[in-house]
Image (cartoon, rainbow, N blue to C red):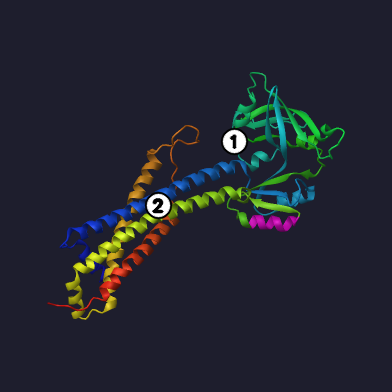
Amino acid sequence: MYLTFAWRYFKAKKSANAINIIAWVTVGVITFAIACQILVLSVFNGFEGLVKSLYASFYADIKIAPAKGKTFILTPQQLTLIKQQKGVSAVSLIAEEKALLQNEDLQTIVYLKGVDNNYSNVTGVAAKTFAGKFNTGTMEEPGLIVGTGIQNAAAINVDAAFAQSKLTLILPKKVKISVSDPLQSLSEGIATATGVFAIQQDFDNKYAITNIDFVKQQMGFATDEYSGAEIKLSDNTDLGAAQLQLSNLLGNSYVVQTKYQQNTSLYNTMKLEKWFIYAVLTLILFIAAFNMVSALTMLVLEKQKDISVLQSMGANKAMIQKIFLSEGLLLAGIGIFTGIILALIICFLQVYFKLIKLEGRSFLIDYFPVKLQASDFLLVTFTAIIIAFFASWFPARKASKQLIELR
């Protein structure tokens, strides 16, 4: 019943055209705000999904790291128990350290990551190797796979048709520095460039991957000493449950991190940016709320005689108030519905036709990615309804206090 009154008041002719204009402006602002919020949140979802997929290519589902220091001891018995845990699909052992990479007169600092043969089953780096082959070689003849940034910085060649680059790697040893000869704390090894990967700039400019036994030999690791262990989980395995299971198995001497905890700052920053943009766009709804207050206040003045008639027929204050609250929610509802439809049309056009392009050619994709989430629609709709309710409350309350005045 209340919506019936609200609908009649909305479409009825007003004595002043300004009331109609303000009402339609209110609907238009709400439509614009809703469409903008959904579009921006969907683009953020698209970029978040893209970044997560890129980082998932390099980071394993779970990483085991030392609680103190840079290395830990992982015995064959412990490794067997880890592999037997529910949901564990593959385990790769890691030995990593900063190193100086030299190619003739060119040199650069890299994060050298020694990996075993299971590494290709744990991460997607091998699939991202676009030049040469993902071949880490052996301890005696190690192969080196570098990121594109490192390749460019050191002019590395991996083409077998030409002479593959022989690279010098200088690493720190696990020995005390001698005051008389500090060079004793460094080791020097030769590796052959075998491949180049391209994932994301953070990885491409920093990491070089080689044979784990070569790195352990150069750094003087013990037989069962490692820098970390990376684990691939089976599909549909609960990440949190697997982390807790491994933490209980290994104890306090080890830190078990999920792929999100390995990049906490990145994911937290992405979430903060998303919510900040959402908060800024919500300000547009507050602008619409002021328009709504103006439209409803003028409507109350317009319908003074109607209010008096309703009161004389037995309508109480609560009924009058609900009628004008319904009027405000009707304006918001039309704007919300129109905004959602508009946003859906734009999103589907972007998904299928890639209409809006990214400037520059340094991105992996050349268009804005879009990912629709039901939670965003619910959040935006709920926010708009709450703001519309409070914006409608004051004019509706004023209407309910209107005195009976029939002439």
Image x and y of residue 115, in percent: 71, 38
Report, in whole angstroms, how far the alpha carbon at label 1 lies from the one at label 2.
Answer: 36 Å
User: Is 32 drawn above or below residue 331 in the view shown?
Assistant: above
On residue 357, the disc is none
Residue 287 in view in this figure: yes
Q: Is residue 102 left or right of residue 360?
A: right
Decide: few, some or many residues near mark 1? Use Cα within 10 Å; few <14, some 14-19, many ≥20: some
Task: State the residue lying farthest toward the top.
Answer: 162
Magenta range: 241-252
Q: In this view, does 65 lie to the left or right of 326?
A: right
Task: Say if the magenta span includes residue 248.
Answer: yes
User: Is 319 drawn above or below residue 241 in the view shown?
Assistant: below
- Front position in the image: 357 or 58: 357
- Front position in the image: 61 or 278: 278
On residue 127, the disc is 1
Residue 15 placement: quadrant: bottom left
Q: Name the residue under label 2.
A: 37
At horizontal 36% and vertical 49% (from top left) the residue drawn is 344
Looking at the rendered structure, the kind of residue marked 2 is Gln
At horizontal 22% and vertical 66% (from top left) the residue drawn is 299
Image x and y of residue 273, in percent: 49, 50
Question: For the C terminus, which image quadrant?
Answer: bottom left
Q: Is residue 296 left or right of residue 354?
A: left
Question: For the N terminus, which image quadrant?
Answer: bottom left
Image x and y of residue 402, in percent: 23, 75
